[in-house]
Image (cartoon, rainbow, N blue to C red):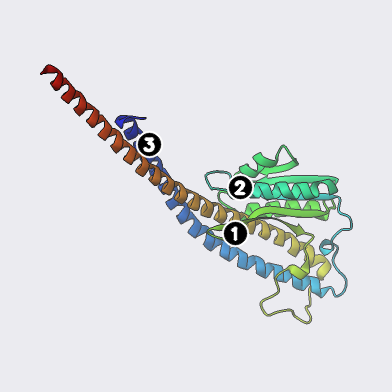
Amino acid sequence: MANFREYNVRIQRLQNMRRVTLAMKMLSTTKLARAQETMARAQAFVREWGGLVRLASRAGGSIRHPLLVPRAAPESAFVLMVSSDMGLCGGFNNNLNRAVSGWLDANQAKYRILRFSFCGRKGHQFARDRVEVRSFYENSVRRPDLKLALAIGREVFATYAEGKYDEVYVARNRYAGPLSQEPVVERILPADPDVLPAPPEGEAPFVLVEPGPARQIPQLLERYVGYRLFEALLENASGEHAARMAAMDSASKNISALVDTYTLLRNRARQASITTELIEVVSGAEALR
Protein backbone atom coordinates (compact mmCIF):
# COMPACT_ATOMS: atom_id res chain seq x y z
CA MET A 1 0.00 0.00 0.00
CA ALA A 2 1.31 3.45 -0.96
CA ASN A 3 2.09 5.94 1.78
CA PHE A 4 0.78 9.46 2.31
CA ARG A 5 3.46 11.21 0.23
CA GLU A 6 3.15 8.83 -2.72
CA TYR A 7 -0.60 9.48 -2.88
CA ASN A 8 0.06 13.23 -2.84
CA VAL A 9 2.36 12.86 -5.85
CA ARG A 10 -0.22 10.80 -7.75
CA ILE A 11 -3.00 13.28 -6.99
CA GLN A 12 -0.86 16.20 -8.12
CA ARG A 13 -0.06 14.46 -11.41
CA LEU A 14 -3.72 13.67 -12.01
CA GLN A 15 -4.73 17.25 -11.29
CA ASN A 16 -2.15 18.50 -13.80
CA MET A 17 -3.46 16.04 -16.37
CA ARG A 18 -7.04 17.19 -15.71
CA ARG A 19 -6.04 20.79 -16.43
CA VAL A 20 -4.75 19.66 -19.82
CA THR A 21 -7.86 17.64 -20.70
CA LEU A 22 -10.18 20.47 -19.66
CA ALA A 23 -8.18 22.95 -21.74
CA MET A 24 -8.32 20.62 -24.75
CA LYS A 25 -12.08 20.21 -24.27
CA MET A 26 -12.61 23.98 -24.21
CA LEU A 27 -10.43 24.45 -27.28
CA SER A 28 -12.27 21.73 -29.21
CA THR A 29 -15.62 23.24 -28.22
CA THR A 30 -14.58 26.61 -29.67
CA LYS A 31 -13.20 25.06 -32.85
CA LEU A 32 -16.31 22.91 -33.27
CA ALA A 33 -18.61 25.94 -33.25
CA ARG A 34 -16.58 27.60 -36.02
CA ALA A 35 -16.27 24.39 -38.04
CA GLN A 36 -20.02 23.71 -37.86
CA GLU A 37 -20.82 27.16 -39.22
CA THR A 38 -18.44 26.78 -42.16
CA MET A 39 -19.63 23.23 -42.83
CA ALA A 40 -23.30 24.29 -42.95
CA ARG A 41 -22.54 26.96 -45.57
CA ALA A 42 -20.49 24.51 -47.63
CA GLN A 43 -23.21 21.84 -47.53
CA ALA A 44 -25.81 24.32 -48.78
CA PHE A 45 -23.52 25.32 -51.65
CA VAL A 46 -22.81 21.69 -52.57
CA ARG A 47 -26.54 20.98 -52.72
CA GLU A 48 -27.03 23.96 -55.07
CA TRP A 49 -24.16 22.86 -57.30
CA GLY A 50 -25.43 19.29 -57.35
CA GLY A 51 -28.76 20.67 -58.53
CA LEU A 52 -26.98 22.34 -61.46
CA VAL A 53 -25.37 19.03 -62.45
CA ARG A 54 -28.75 17.34 -62.24
CA LEU A 55 -30.42 19.98 -64.42
CA ALA A 56 -27.63 19.79 -67.00
CA SER A 57 -27.92 16.00 -67.14
CA ARG A 58 -31.68 16.27 -67.72
CA ALA A 59 -31.13 18.73 -70.56
CA GLY A 60 -29.62 15.97 -72.65
CA GLY A 61 -32.94 14.17 -72.87
CA SER A 62 -32.69 10.40 -73.04
CA ILE A 63 -28.97 10.52 -73.91
CA ARG A 64 -26.85 10.09 -70.79
CA HIS A 65 -23.41 11.68 -70.63
CA PRO A 66 -20.61 9.04 -70.45
CA LEU A 67 -19.30 10.56 -67.20
CA LEU A 68 -22.66 9.87 -65.54
CA VAL A 69 -23.06 6.28 -66.72
CA PRO A 70 -21.67 3.46 -64.52
CA ARG A 71 -19.11 1.40 -66.37
CA ALA A 72 -19.85 -2.25 -66.96
CA ALA A 73 -17.76 -4.64 -64.85
CA PRO A 74 -15.50 -2.01 -63.19
CA GLU A 75 -11.94 -3.26 -62.84
CA SER A 76 -10.20 -0.25 -61.32
CA ALA A 77 -11.08 1.99 -58.42
CA PHE A 78 -9.64 4.95 -56.58
CA VAL A 79 -10.36 5.78 -52.92
CA LEU A 80 -9.62 9.05 -51.14
CA MET A 81 -9.51 8.43 -47.38
CA VAL A 82 -10.08 11.45 -45.12
CA SER A 83 -9.03 11.09 -41.48
CA SER A 84 -7.33 13.26 -38.86
CA ASP A 85 -3.68 14.07 -38.24
CA MET A 86 -3.92 13.83 -34.45
CA GLY A 87 -5.23 11.34 -31.93
CA LEU A 88 -6.91 11.86 -28.55
CA CYS A 89 -10.33 11.92 -30.23
CA GLY A 90 -11.88 8.67 -29.01
CA GLY A 91 -12.89 6.18 -31.69
CA PHE A 92 -13.07 8.77 -34.48
CA ASN A 93 -10.22 7.29 -36.53
CA ASN A 94 -10.57 3.70 -35.35
CA ASN A 95 -14.19 3.52 -36.49
CA LEU A 96 -13.23 4.81 -39.94
CA ASN A 97 -10.33 2.37 -40.13
CA ARG A 98 -12.67 -0.53 -39.35
CA ALA A 99 -15.13 0.65 -42.00
CA VAL A 100 -12.37 0.87 -44.62
CA SER A 101 -11.04 -2.53 -43.58
CA GLY A 102 -14.50 -4.06 -43.99
CA TRP A 103 -14.91 -2.39 -47.39
CA LEU A 104 -11.54 -3.77 -48.51
CA ASP A 105 -12.43 -7.28 -47.39
CA ALA A 106 -15.67 -7.11 -49.36
CA ASN A 107 -14.45 -5.36 -52.53
CA GLN A 108 -10.68 -5.61 -52.96
CA ALA A 109 -10.79 -8.92 -54.84
CA LYS A 110 -13.04 -7.61 -57.63
CA TYR A 111 -10.67 -4.81 -58.69
CA ARG A 112 -7.61 -5.38 -60.81
CA ILE A 113 -6.34 -1.92 -59.85
CA LEU A 114 -7.10 -0.33 -56.47
CA ARG A 115 -5.26 2.79 -55.34
CA PHE A 116 -5.66 5.04 -52.32
CA SER A 117 -4.86 8.66 -51.58
CA PHE A 118 -4.95 10.09 -48.07
CA CYS A 119 -5.89 13.33 -46.37
CA GLY A 120 -4.87 12.84 -42.76
CA ARG A 121 -1.96 11.03 -41.15
CA LYS A 122 -3.99 8.49 -39.14
CA GLY A 123 -5.64 6.93 -42.17
CA HIS A 124 -2.34 6.85 -44.04
CA GLN A 125 -0.61 5.07 -41.16
CA PHE A 126 -3.39 2.50 -40.99
CA ALA A 127 -3.78 1.59 -44.68
CA ARG A 128 -0.41 2.27 -46.31
CA ASP A 129 0.76 -1.31 -45.80
CA ARG A 130 -2.50 -2.82 -47.11
CA VAL A 131 -3.09 -0.86 -50.32
CA GLU A 132 -1.22 0.85 -53.12
CA VAL A 133 -0.73 4.50 -52.18
CA ARG A 134 -1.07 7.11 -54.91
CA SER A 135 -0.77 10.35 -52.90
CA PHE A 136 -0.59 11.61 -49.34
CA TYR A 137 -1.72 15.21 -48.92
CA GLU A 138 0.04 16.52 -45.83
CA ASN A 139 -1.43 19.34 -43.74
CA SER A 140 -4.76 19.08 -45.56
CA VAL A 141 -7.16 18.35 -42.68
CA ARG A 142 -6.26 20.68 -39.83
CA ARG A 143 -7.44 23.75 -41.72
CA PRO A 144 -9.57 22.66 -44.70
CA ASP A 145 -8.75 24.84 -47.70
CA LEU A 146 -11.07 25.26 -50.69
CA LYS A 147 -8.22 25.78 -53.15
CA LEU A 148 -6.56 22.55 -52.09
CA ALA A 149 -9.87 20.65 -52.25
CA LEU A 150 -10.52 21.95 -55.78
CA ALA A 151 -6.97 21.02 -56.83
CA ILE A 152 -7.43 17.49 -55.50
CA GLY A 153 -10.85 17.36 -57.17
CA ARG A 154 -9.36 18.33 -60.55
CA GLU A 155 -6.69 15.67 -60.19
CA VAL A 156 -9.19 12.98 -59.23
CA PHE A 157 -11.65 13.96 -61.94
CA ALA A 158 -8.96 14.04 -64.62
CA THR A 159 -7.86 10.48 -63.86
CA TYR A 160 -11.48 9.31 -64.00
CA ALA A 161 -12.28 11.18 -67.22
CA GLU A 162 -9.17 9.70 -68.86
CA GLY A 163 -10.40 6.21 -68.02
CA LYS A 164 -7.67 5.33 -65.52
CA TYR A 165 -10.31 4.42 -62.93
CA ASP A 166 -13.82 3.07 -63.35
CA GLU A 167 -15.03 4.23 -59.94
CA VAL A 168 -13.99 6.87 -57.41
CA TYR A 169 -14.84 6.64 -53.70
CA VAL A 170 -14.41 8.84 -50.65
CA ALA A 171 -13.92 7.21 -47.22
CA ARG A 172 -14.75 9.64 -44.43
CA ASN A 173 -16.63 10.25 -41.22
CA ARG A 174 -20.04 11.72 -42.00
CA TYR A 175 -20.96 14.34 -39.40
CA ALA A 176 -24.32 13.40 -37.88
CA GLY A 177 -24.06 15.57 -34.77
CA PRO A 178 -21.71 16.51 -31.91
CA LEU A 179 -22.03 13.02 -30.41
CA SER A 180 -22.30 10.98 -33.61
CA GLN A 181 -19.93 10.52 -36.55
CA GLU A 182 -20.78 7.84 -39.08
CA PRO A 183 -17.89 6.25 -41.07
CA VAL A 184 -18.85 5.75 -44.72
CA VAL A 185 -17.23 4.73 -47.99
CA GLU A 186 -19.32 6.39 -50.70
CA ARG A 187 -19.00 6.58 -54.47
CA ILE A 188 -18.75 10.05 -56.01
CA LEU A 189 -17.87 9.04 -59.60
CA PRO A 190 -19.68 8.14 -61.71
CA ALA A 191 -22.25 10.52 -60.28
CA ASP A 192 -25.85 9.36 -60.33
CA PRO A 193 -28.13 12.26 -61.35
CA ASP A 194 -31.07 10.52 -59.67
CA VAL A 195 -29.49 10.93 -56.23
CA LEU A 196 -28.11 14.43 -56.79
CA PRO A 197 -29.99 17.19 -54.95
CA ALA A 198 -32.98 18.59 -56.79
CA PRO A 199 -33.10 22.36 -57.41
CA PRO A 200 -34.98 24.38 -54.77
CA GLU A 201 -37.90 24.98 -57.11
CA GLY A 202 -38.10 21.29 -58.09
CA GLU A 203 -37.46 19.65 -61.44
CA ALA A 204 -37.80 22.00 -64.42
CA PRO A 205 -39.73 20.58 -67.38
CA PHE A 206 -37.20 21.98 -69.85
CA VAL A 207 -33.73 23.43 -69.41
CA LEU A 208 -31.72 25.12 -72.14
CA VAL A 209 -28.00 24.55 -71.58
CA GLU A 210 -25.49 26.52 -73.66
CA PRO A 211 -23.10 25.56 -75.21
CA GLY A 212 -24.70 22.17 -74.50
CA PRO A 213 -24.64 19.36 -71.92
CA ALA A 214 -21.69 17.64 -73.60
CA ARG A 215 -19.43 20.59 -72.75
CA GLN A 216 -21.10 21.81 -69.57
CA ILE A 217 -21.39 18.54 -67.64
CA PRO A 218 -17.61 17.83 -67.42
CA GLN A 219 -16.96 21.36 -66.14
CA LEU A 220 -19.82 21.24 -63.65
CA LEU A 221 -18.92 17.72 -62.52
CA GLU A 222 -15.26 18.58 -62.00
CA ARG A 223 -16.18 21.46 -59.71
CA TYR A 224 -18.80 19.31 -58.00
CA VAL A 225 -16.16 16.72 -57.09
CA GLY A 226 -13.93 19.46 -55.65
CA TYR A 227 -16.77 20.90 -53.60
CA ARG A 228 -17.71 17.42 -52.35
CA LEU A 229 -14.13 16.91 -51.19
CA PHE A 230 -14.15 20.27 -49.45
CA GLU A 231 -17.38 19.29 -47.73
CA ALA A 232 -15.76 15.99 -46.67
CA LEU A 233 -12.78 17.86 -45.20
CA LEU A 234 -15.08 20.19 -43.27
CA GLU A 235 -17.19 17.32 -41.96
CA ASN A 236 -14.00 15.53 -40.95
CA ALA A 237 -12.80 18.62 -39.06
CA SER A 238 -16.16 19.06 -37.30
CA GLY A 239 -16.30 15.37 -36.40
CA GLU A 240 -12.74 15.40 -35.09
CA HIS A 241 -13.39 18.42 -32.83
CA ALA A 242 -16.66 16.90 -31.59
CA ALA A 243 -15.03 13.53 -30.90
CA ARG A 244 -12.10 15.15 -29.11
CA MET A 245 -14.45 17.31 -27.04
CA ALA A 246 -16.38 14.22 -25.93
CA ALA A 247 -13.18 12.23 -25.30
CA MET A 248 -11.62 14.99 -23.20
CA ASP A 249 -14.84 15.44 -21.25
CA SER A 250 -14.90 11.71 -20.48
CA ALA A 251 -11.19 11.78 -19.59
CA SER A 252 -11.70 14.73 -17.23
CA LYS A 253 -14.54 12.91 -15.45
CA ASN A 254 -12.46 9.74 -15.12
CA ILE A 255 -9.53 11.73 -13.74
CA SER A 256 -11.82 13.42 -11.21
CA ALA A 257 -13.05 9.99 -10.11
CA LEU A 258 -9.44 8.81 -9.69
CA VAL A 259 -8.57 11.95 -7.71
CA ASP A 260 -11.48 11.27 -5.36
CA THR A 261 -10.40 7.63 -4.97
CA TYR A 262 -6.76 8.53 -4.30
CA THR A 263 -7.81 11.27 -1.87
CA LEU A 264 -9.78 8.72 0.11
CA LEU A 265 -6.86 6.27 0.06
CA ARG A 266 -4.44 9.05 1.04
CA ASN A 267 -6.58 9.98 4.03
CA ARG A 268 -6.77 6.35 5.06
CA ALA A 269 -3.00 6.00 4.73
CA ARG A 270 -2.51 9.16 6.78
CA GLN A 271 -4.90 7.93 9.43
CA ALA A 272 -3.14 4.56 9.53
CA SER A 273 0.23 6.30 9.86
CA ILE A 274 -1.01 8.46 12.73
CA THR A 275 -2.55 5.45 14.45
CA THR A 276 0.70 3.51 14.08
CA GLU A 277 2.71 6.40 15.57
CA LEU A 278 0.30 6.70 18.51
CA ILE A 279 0.56 2.98 19.18
CA GLU A 280 4.36 3.21 19.13
CA VAL A 281 4.33 6.18 21.54
CA VAL A 282 1.93 4.47 23.92
CA SER A 283 3.88 1.20 23.71
CA GLY A 284 7.13 3.05 24.43
CA ALA A 285 5.63 4.84 27.40
CA GLU A 286 4.28 1.58 28.77
CA ALA A 287 7.70 -0.02 28.36
CA LEU A 288 9.34 2.73 30.43
CA ARG A 289 7.07 2.20 33.41
Quadrant in the picture for residue 58? bottom right
User: Left or right of 98: which side holds 25?
Assistant: left
Q: Label 3, on which residue?
A: 13
The residue lying at 63 percent from left, 67 percent from top is: 45
Task: Reply above or below: 259 against 6.
Answer: below
Q: Secondary structure at mark 2?
A: helix
Q: At which x and y percent is residue 87?
A: 55, 43
- Most foreground residue, 91 or 32: 91
Give yes or no for contact between labels 2 and 1 (Cβ–Cβ under 8 Å): no
Q: Label 2, on which residue?
A: 93
Q: Secondary structure at mark 3?
A: helix
Q: Residue furthest bottom?
A: 205
Quadrant in the picture for residue 16? top left
Q: Which mark is on residue 175? A: 1
The residue lying at 42 percent from left, 49 percent from top is: 253
What whole-number distance in Å separates the C-alpha atoms at marks 3 and 2? 28 Å
Q: At which x and y percent is residue 20?
A: 41, 43
Task: Reply above or below: 158 against 266.
Answer: below
Tell me which label, 3 or 1, sits earlier in the chain.
3
Give yes or no for contact between labels 3 and 2 (Cβ–Cβ under 8 Å): no
User: Left or right of 72: which side holds 259?
Assistant: left
Q: Amino acid at mark 3?
A: Arg
The residue lying at 77 percent from left, 54 percent from top is: 168
What whole-number distance in Å separates the C-alpha atoms at marks 3 and 1? 35 Å
User: Left or right of 62: which side holds 288?
Assistant: left
**In this rendering, which labeled residue sits more in front, label 3 or label 2?**
3
Tell me which label, 3 or 2, sits earlier in the chain.
3
Q: Amino acid at mark 2?
A: Asn
Q: Residues within 10 Å of mark 1 (few under 14, many from 20)?
A: many
Residue 44 appears in the picture as rendered: yes
Q: Which mark is on residue 49? A: none
Quadrant in the picture for residue 43? bottom right
